[in-house]
Amino acid sequence: MNTIYKKIIVNDLMQRNYQYTLTEPVGKNFNPRFKPELTPKEMLRLGVFGGKYMTDCADEFPPDWYKNVKLCHEFHNPELNHFKINASQPLSVWQAKGWIYPEDPRGWFQWYCRYYMGRRIPGEDDKQIKRWLAMRRHISQIKSNCLPGDLNCRKKQRQALLHWAYDSRKI
C-alpha cells in the first residue's frame, strides 16, 4: 500500500500557518516501543485536561473526535475529567521545564494527536515516546497501593495516566 502524503496547515490560537505532512496512515506504523492504550478520540471522550485542551483545534482533527466530548472553552474544569480531579500542571510549568517544543506548543497530547494522524518528526518522536514510557511508574504505584479495580484509589494518578494514553481503568 502506498502512503499518501497530506499537508496540514494549522491556524489556531497557538499556531499560525504551522505546516506539517502526514507520512503514515492514521493510527498505524507507530514506533514499536510506543503502544498507547487509548486513542486521542477515546481520551477526549473519557474526559481529560479539564475539557479545555485543544478546544480551538477542531479543524485540524477528525470531526468525530469531538462528538460526545465535554469541552469547556473558558477554563480548565476538573469536573469534566473522567476521575473528576485535576491532574494537570499549568502550561507555564511545562514551558519552564523545557517540555514544550515549537512544533507542539500545547505539549505531549498535541504531539500524540499529530503522531496518531501520521506526522513523524525524527528525534522529537523519540523524546516524546521516552516521556510516555516514564509515566509507567504511576502504573506500578497504583498496582502496589490499590486493590485491583478500585477506581477511587489514587484518582489523581489514574487521571494523569489517562492524559498519557494509558487506560488506568483497567488497573
Image (cartoon, rainbow, N blue to C red):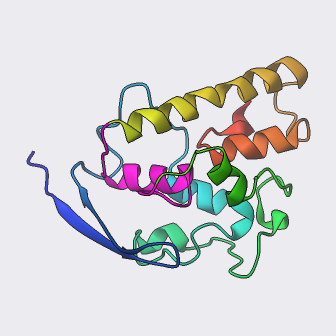
In the rendered image, the vertical position of residue 31 relative to residue 107, given as above or below: above
Quadrant including the C terminus: top right
**Along the viewing direction, whichever of 140 and 97 lies nearer the viewer:** 97
Furthest residue toward bottom? 74
Percent from the top left, x then y, of residue 14? 51, 73
Displayed quadrant of residue 72: bottom right
The residue closer to the viewer here, 25 or 15, is: 15
> Residue at 88% of width from left, 34% of height from top?
150
Q: Which span is picked out in magenta?
A: 102-122
Which residue occupies 59% across, 45% down? 98
Res 47 seen here: no
Q: Quick check: 50 left or right of 8?
A: right
Q: Which residue is depicted at the point 72% across and 52% down?
A: 93
Which part of the image, by quadrant, shows the N terminus?
top left
Q: Position of residue 102 (x, y in %)?
A: 44, 57
- Which residue is most to the top? 144
The answer to whether residue 75 is above or below residue 83 is below
Query: Is residue 142 positioned above or below 108 on the image?
Result: above
Query: Is residue 160 covered in magenta?
Result: no
- Residue beneath the point at 36% across and 48% down: 27
Q: Position of residue 4 (x, y in %)?
A: 13, 56
Left or right of residue 113, residue 153 in this image? right
Please say whether residue 85 is visible from this viewpoint: yes
Is residue 120 inside the magenta stretch? yes
**Residue 26: percent from left, percent from top:** 31, 53
Labels in figure, total: 0
> Relative to residue 46, is residue 132 drawn left or right?
left
